[in-house]
Image: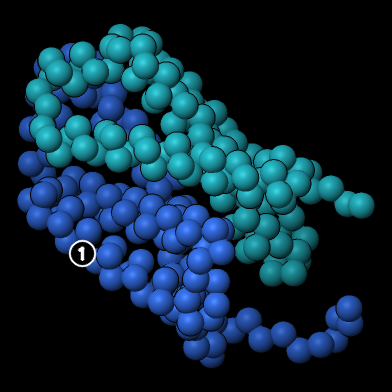
């Protein structure tokens, strides 16, 4: 059996589940933060919210979920369009390069998030 | 599988059904949001760093260009979320038929238009 080496969990079923779990976490986070913003906040209340441990944990959970979610999603996009069939062997090089850049970007997002939340 | 079989992947000669449009838009908004996260993190950073940066962020929100960019990110987030919820519902076995798929795509697109307009009104 050939195993997909660049997918999230080397298995379609695992990826499918991680995609859903991370999606629900992200939806909950965006609904909550969106709700806070719609209600309107000043600096004090906003800062107070993000100084709470639970909010920092919730934010980091959302950011890590985003990494998982984006990896699974972009993997599907890259393996559909940047392929040998589409553009010959260039496709394989481009796909691995795109995945590498995508991984670096996500890692940077996570570190940036830690810096924002704990570097205050 | 024989390699000689004809393959038609000429996107200009294929008439895509609404379900295909809903699907490709879900993908496109996902890719766009991956870049949009940079804007969200930058905004979060500026909003929390200090009272001064919070105030200057509020000031920069008056820029029509930034309003437009934020609206675009919000529109992508709204569509991507609704299309995602549709997927979760379909995972439960609801609306898996062809007719159900078309109806689901229509509902997602219609609701997105409404929510995106509301978001636009909220921003401006």
Q: Residue at x 70, y 67 (%)?
A: A87
Q: Is residue A78 left or right of residue A111?
A: right
- The picture places residue A68, in percent across and down from the top left corner, at 57, 38
- Displayed quadrant of residue B28: bottom left
Q: Quadrant of the N terminus of chain B?
A: bottom right
- The picture places residue A104, in percent across and down from the top left corner, at 57, 33
- Displayed quadrant of residue A90: bottom right
- Displayed quadrant of residue B102: bottom left
**Other-residue count near label 1 (Cα within 10 Å), few / some / many at <14 / 14–19 / ≥20:** few
**A88, above or below A32, in the image:** below
**A51, above or below B10, in the image:** above
**B93, above or below B45, in the image:** below
Nearer to us in this view, B8 or B92: B92
Callout 1: SS? helix
- The picture places residue B6, in percent across and down from the top left corner, at 76, 89
Q: Residue at x 28, y 27 (%)?
A: B44
Q: Residue at x 45, y 30 (%)?
A: A63
Judging from the image, mark 1 belongs to the subunit labelled B
> Which color is chain B depicted in?
blue
Could you tell me if residue B104 is visible in this image? yes
Q: Residue at the far right: name it.
A: A1
Q: Chain in cyan?
A: A
Q: Residue at x 43, y 55 (%)?
A: B85
Could you tell me if residue A105 is visible in this image? no
Q: Is residue B113 left or right of residue A107?
A: left
- The picture places residue B16, in percent across and down from the top left corner, at 49, 83
Q: Which residue is mark 1?
A: B114
How is colour applied across the structure in the image? Answer: by chain
**A89, above or below A74, in the image:** below
């Amino acid at each position: 059996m050939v195993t997909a080496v660049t997918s999230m969990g080397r298995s379609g079923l695992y990826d499918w589940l991680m995609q859903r779990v991370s999606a629900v976490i992200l939806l909950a986070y965006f609904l909550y933060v969106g709700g806070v913003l719609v209600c309107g906040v000043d600096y004090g209340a906003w800062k107070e919210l993000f100084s709470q441990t639970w909010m920092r944990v919730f934010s980091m959970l959302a950011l890590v979920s985003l990494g998982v979610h984006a990896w699974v999603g972009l993997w599907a996009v890259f393996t559909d369009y940047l392929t040998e069939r589409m553009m010959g062997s260039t496709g394989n090089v481009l796909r691995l390069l795109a995945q590498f850049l995508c991984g670096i970007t996500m890692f940077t997002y996570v570190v940036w998030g830690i810096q924002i939340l704990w570097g205050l | 599988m024989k390699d000689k079989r004809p393959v038609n992947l000429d996107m200009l000669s294929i008439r895509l059904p609404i379900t295909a449009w809903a699907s490709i838009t879900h993908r496109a908004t996902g890719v766009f949001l991956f870049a949009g996260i940079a804007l969200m993190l930058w905004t979060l950073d500026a909003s929390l760093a200090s009272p001064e940066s919070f105030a200057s962020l509020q000031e920069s929100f008056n820029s029509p260009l930034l309003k437009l960019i934020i609206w675009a990110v919000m529109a992508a987030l709204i569509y991507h979320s609704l299309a995602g919820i549709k997927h979760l519902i379909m995972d439960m076995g609801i609306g898996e038929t062809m007719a159900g798929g078309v109806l689901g795509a229509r509902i997602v697109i219609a609701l997105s238009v409404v929510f995106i307009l509301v978001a636009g009104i909220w921003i401006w």
